[in-house]
Amino acid sequence: MKPESAALSPGPEGSWRRAARELRAAFRRWKRPSHEQRLLAFERSGSVPWSDGYAIHRSRVIASTLADEQAMDVFRRGQPLPAGFGYGLDERCVEVPWVLSRLSRETGRVLDAGSALNFLYLLELPLWRQIDLHILTLAPETNCFWQRGISYLFEDLRDLPQRDGLYDQVISISTLEHVGFDNREFAGAGRLEFRPEDFRRAVSELARVLKVGGRALMTVPYGVPERLSGHQVFDAQGLTNLVDAFGPAESRLSHYRYDEKGWQLAGPEACTDRRFVDWISRPPAERARSPFPVQPDGAAAARSVACIELVKTA
């Protein structure tokens, strides 16, 4: 198989220079391993979290869960997960199905506060056909699917420009823990701060832009409380503070716990000793490089998450 050829069309930069640049780009695409090749290499290397192929593996596990109505019903009903579910995967494998199992399919506006759903395999789901989805994050990302009718907003969660009661539903997947911390990885210079209580302002803003009767679906890492450089881990008191900041609402909490058997539904008391994987929580310049550290239990990031469902009552 040969790399595709480039047309030698004239242009202001010179046809030969342009052709050489396009040929180099085509060669890079030709040499790039396919998803199947990367998955195979990931499995052969021991399926180490965050190594090459990990993100593809994770997305396929999540996609297969979302496509399995019986599996989604397990999340919807708050039932125990199958043995070994999500072994070696980070918390997204439970957060995304939990959130989407509870999202109303009715028409209306939905805010994804934190851009956790900004992936094509998630945005191709039929549920978005009647929903006006707004994705909000601090700065533009590589993924952008505006042609699918999605609105992108680049704002701070602590000071939203939207009017009161604009949204029918609000989603925030593993985002609130980052508010007020070092967010240079997501938004560049100028986002270095340490204001750990600012999640309250963000939650209050999310409640403000949600309609009365609307639903907020939020997830945060849970367990041993820690304030790290880029985020924090919530405990029971932290969750109480979060719910209080939202204001009058009907609330329901679910917890999922990770151990050497994978992810499983658990009571909050069984999650209090769970610690976040330390090396992945460090700033990018301080993180370990390949080969990545392997945890004894195979954990990738959080070892427990709290999933919070709030229905605004006033």
Image: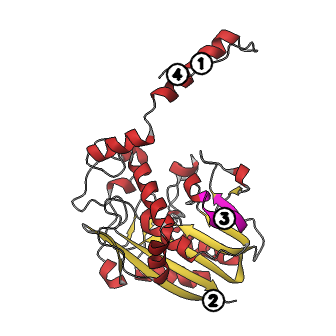
Residue displayed at 46% across by 74% down: 70
Q: Is residue 196 left or right of residue 129?
A: left
Residue displayed at 57% across by 60% down: 117
Amino acid type at image mark 4? Pro
Amino acid type at image mark 2? Pro
The numbered disc on residue 3 is: 4
- Label 2, on which residue? 248
Q: CA distance from mark 3 to mark 4?
A: 37 Å
Q: Is residue 233 above or below residue 280?
A: below
Q: Is residue 76 above or below residue 260?
A: below
Q: Is residue 128 magenta?
A: yes
| Cβ–Cβ under 8 Å for marks 4 and 2 | no
- Label 3, on which residue? 128
Image x and y of residue 111, in percent: 66, 67
Image x and y of residue 129, in percent: 70, 64
The numbered disc on residue 5 is: 1
Image-quadrant location for residue 215: bottom right
Q: Dot 4, crowdedness within 10 Å: few (<14), some or many (≥20)? A: some
Q: CA distance from mark 4 to mark 2?
A: 60 Å
Residue at disc 4, secondary structure: loop
Q: Earlier in the sequence, mark 1 or mark 2?
A: 1
**Residue 39 in sight:** yes
Amino acid type at image mark 3? Trp
| Cβ–Cβ under 8 Å for marks 1 and 4 | yes
